[in-house]
Amino acid sequence: MTVAELPFVFALVFIGTAFTSATLQTVAKVWPRPANIPPLSAADIDQLTPKERMDAINSTHASRIQALSTFGVMLGVAFTVGGLIYTAGTLEATQQGQITDRYTKAVEQLGSQARDVRLGAIYALERIARDSERDHETVLAVLAAYAREHGDEKGYSKASKDVVAALTVIGRNPPEKWTIGWLDLSEVQAPSVRLTGLDLQFVDLVSANLSRTTLTDGNFRNARLIRANLSAANLSDSVGDAYVVKPIGNRPASFVQADLQGADLERAMCAGVDFSGADMRSINAKNSGMYSSNLSGADLRKANMSGASLGDADMRDSMLSYADFHGAKMQGADFRGAQIDNIDLRGADLRKAKGLPSIDQIKKLGGKVDEDTKF
């Protein structure tokens, strides 16, 4: 029971006591009893025996005592609930003090020279984030700062275990709603690690190095990955879509100018995502959902886009040489200014597409079409 709940409990107890008292009084009034008897006269009282007089006096006193007892019980309930409120308030203050002490100790341990101590501190902070809603975002911000400061500066070797632990804790404990804005993980160095199933919504990964990193089953809605290095990263089954699943007003992930060379986005849901200017050479985006995405100026040479959904995608001025669009759904896509030599369009649906040359010109440029290609 929390302090906030106690006034409600007090109100219920008070109302219940009052209701019970009123009910008993009502029952007493309607309970069958003998016909009204006129008050006793002085002569009648003189005729009573000593025992009868004593019984009458005791009956009167009993009624008064009962009324006082009822009042006393209600007053006792009020004092009891008040005591509970005071106790709960004291308990909450004590708990907050303990959380503060745990938080301070964990932050101090992050500076330890021993990696095991640092790992323990990271998981202690995770426990605090789960125990204290008011400290949730603060803890994640501290772990983000730690990951930024302790990443591999060269960016070539594998990220340390404590940096991976910090990123994992961040990704599996997102708040229901961010109030501090974007969580700053810009320029974090975390190459060649496994970070699966993480929720990285509203995370700023601008210029981050996540090359060769496994990011499968991740959630990148509203994330910022501008100029991020995701070359050879595995993003299979990850989510980048905001427009289709999320209400209007949320922003999609931004992969503007990101390095995605050789990245694995097979079956990734990236509808409405901004890939403009991104390096996507040799990417595997087979059966991915990229409809309404911005691929303008992107380098998709030798990309595997077979079976991908690219309806209404903006592919203006993109480089598509030797790209495989076999069976891709590209209705309404805009190819104006795109480089399309040696492109594979067999079985692709290109109805209402803009900027494509004639079939004969596509073939002269080394492109592949067949009877299943739809123009």
Image: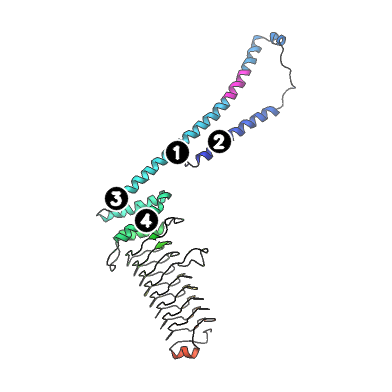
**Does the CB distance between marks 4 and 1 fall below 8 Å?**
no
Nearer the observer: mark 2 or 3; the answer is: 3
Nearest the viewer among 127 and 271 is 271
**Does the CB distance between marks 2 and 1 fall below 8 Å?**
no
- Which amino acid, by three-letter code, is at mark 1? Ala
**Does the CB distance between marks 2 and 3 fall below 8 Å?**
no
Q: Give the distance between the C-alpha atoms of the residues marked 2 and 1, in whole angstroms.
A: 17 Å
Circle number at residue 13: 2
Circle 1: element type: helix
Q: Residue furthest right?
A: 35
- Which amino acid, by three-letter code, is at mark 2? Val
> Is 259 contained in the magenta span?
no
Q: Which residue is mark 4?
A: 141
> Is 63 contained in the magenta span?
yes
Circle number at residue 88: 1
Q: Residue furthest left?
A: 113
Q: Which residues are magenta?
A: 59-68
Mark found first going from the N terminus, 1 or 3: 1
Nearer the observer: mark 3 or 4; the answer is: 4
Q: Decide: is 42 above or below 91.
A: above
User: Residue drawn at (63%, 31%), measured in percent from left and top?
Assistant: 22
Q: Give the distance between the C-alpha atoms of the residues marked 1 and 3, in whole angstroms.
A: 30 Å
Q: Is residue 64 left or right of residue 3?
A: right
Mark found first going from the N terminus, 2 or 3: 2
Q: Which residue is mark 3?
A: 108
Nearest the viewer among 256 and 366 is 256
Mark found first going from the N terminus, 2 or 4: 2
